[in-house]
Structure formats: C-alpha cells, structure tokens
Image (spheres, rainbow, N blue to C red):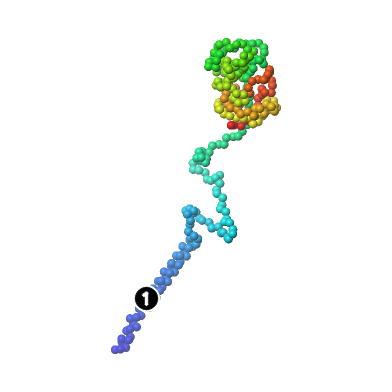
Amino acid sequence: MTPLVAASGPARGQPLAPVLALVIVLTLAIVLTLAIVAALVGGCTGGGPAATGDQRPGTTPGPSPTVSAGSAPEPLPPATSPAMSPARPGGAAPRSHDGGTTRPVSPTAWPGWTVTVYYTAVERFHTGARVRVTGCPTLDCVDGDDELGTYPETFVRAVRDEGTGRTAADAYLNWSHDTGFWLDEAPRDTAGRRLRPFQSAAADQRVLPQGARFTITACGHDEEGERIAAEVCSRLQAARWTISDEFTPGLGGQRHTDVYIGEETGPNFTEGPWYVTLFEATLRPG
C-alpha cells in the first residue's frame, strides 16, 4: 500500500507549473505592451517639452533656440509689417491710432494756380472828366440812388473793377455786384468786412471756402512767360492769405485766387510791376 500513496503525491503538484508559466508570460506581455505604447506616444510628441501658453492650437512650435554659455539668445523674427497684413473682410478701411478712419493726407502743395491782385484805388492819382455816382450813403443799404458825389471817370472805373477806392475826402467809395456803390469809412469785401492788405483774398466758394488759409510758395511766371519781379514775388510769398472775399460771378474759376495788396501807390498803377497776374503759381494750404 505504501507505493500507491507515494505515487499519488507528485500527481497532485504537477498542475502548478503551467499556471506559473502563464502568469509570467502575461506579465511580460503587459510590460512589453506598455513599453510600446510609451514609445509611440513619445514619438508623436517629438520627445520635446509640453506646449507653453504662447503656442496656439493649429501651430507647430519650432525648435527652441540654443543658447551657449556667454552668448546672447538668437533674436526673434521681426513682426509682420502692417502693409503685409491680409485685407480686412469686406474691404473695410484701415483704422488710425485714435480709432478713426485713416484720412487721405492733405497735399502740401497746390501747383498750377492763377493768382491775380486787387487794390484800393486812390482818387488823387486820377484826373480827367468827372462823373456823377449814385448809391447808398451808408453800408447798411442795397441799390440806393442817393447822390454820392462826382469823381474822375478813371477812378470810378477802377472802383468798379477792384471793389474799393479812397476819395479825396478820405472816405471810401466801395462797390459790389449785389449792393452797387456805397460810401464807407473803410475798404470792404462783399460781406462788409474790412479788407486787410496782404491778408485778405478772394476765391469761388466751391474752390476755396471762407476762412481757408494759404501761402504762395512759387510765383510761376507772368502772361509773357517772364519771371515775376523779385520784390513783388518776395512780398507775396511772405504774406499769409485768408479767403474772406469772393469773386464777382463769372470772374473766378478753378485754381484762381485774387489777393488784396492795399492802396495803389501812384498814377498809372496798373502799368507797374505790382499789377500782375501769376500763372502756374504754387500755393501751400494752412
């Protein structure tokens, strides 16, 4: 009976070996699987550090600049120029720094202008036949028919052409297309404001509005193509002109301004250098 008992002991212990082998195989498989997964994940991220807060979704971070001991970091690439920015949706106008729409830059020069001059006629420089003048005895009047006196015909004609004249009695005989003649204490523009030599100027309102200011930067040439007299040009250029007067209808036009130069200085003033027209002159606004 003893051999039977001895023979049965090894038979009950044999199943343990296969179980341990299976456990070992499964453990190795799990470890190997985890290693493969880790390798795959590391390959997808490039093995680099995690993205920082400055990296936006949809962008690929470039390699970090290498900094060696004692050297400065590589400079960052320049920012994209505004001129290279893509067009705004719908063609919207660019905005200025103050939030307003960018406006066209005002030109610094207006070439191709015609500049004429007007002046106050002075009665004592005129002789010849005298003519009777009627009109308004005061400024606050329109189309009057009061007797205003008799004056040399050439003086009266100059007043109609230029708009104002100083009489021998030191009064002013003025004229405008919408008022006619009137007596006054000062030379006036068509709105009744005092004319100021080398300041007041006239233009059509559709060309230059009331209050517009400019200087003459180049005198151009006269009607014969000759240079303007140096003294005249220098004085006209030194002045700063303001539009406060307007042309008689039909006498203005595009790129035409009339500048007031004060009283005539002697007989035959219109034959001297000051009674001039500038062609192809250049103005500067402001």
**Residue pictured at 54% horizontal, 58% vertical:** 64
Q: Residues within 10 Å of mark 1 (few under 14, many from 20)?
A: few
**Residue pictured at 51% horizontal, 38% vertical:** 101
From where the camera sits, is residue 58 visible?
no
**Residue pictured at 64% horizontal, 17% vertical:** 122
Check the image and name the residue furthest to the left: 1
Place residue 221 in its image quadrant.
Answer: top right
Out of 9 and 260, give the one closest to the viewer: 260
Place residue 177 in its image quadrant.
Answer: top right
Out of 54 and 5, give the one closest to the viewer: 54
Out of 78 and 183, give the one closest to the viewer: 183
Q: Position of residue 18 (x, y in %)?
A: 38, 77
Q: Secondary structure at mark 1?
A: helix
Q: Which residue is mark 1?
A: 19
Is residue 111 rendered to the left or right of residue 24? right
Q: Amino acid at mark 1?
A: Val
Which quarter of the rendered picture does the C terminus lie within? top right
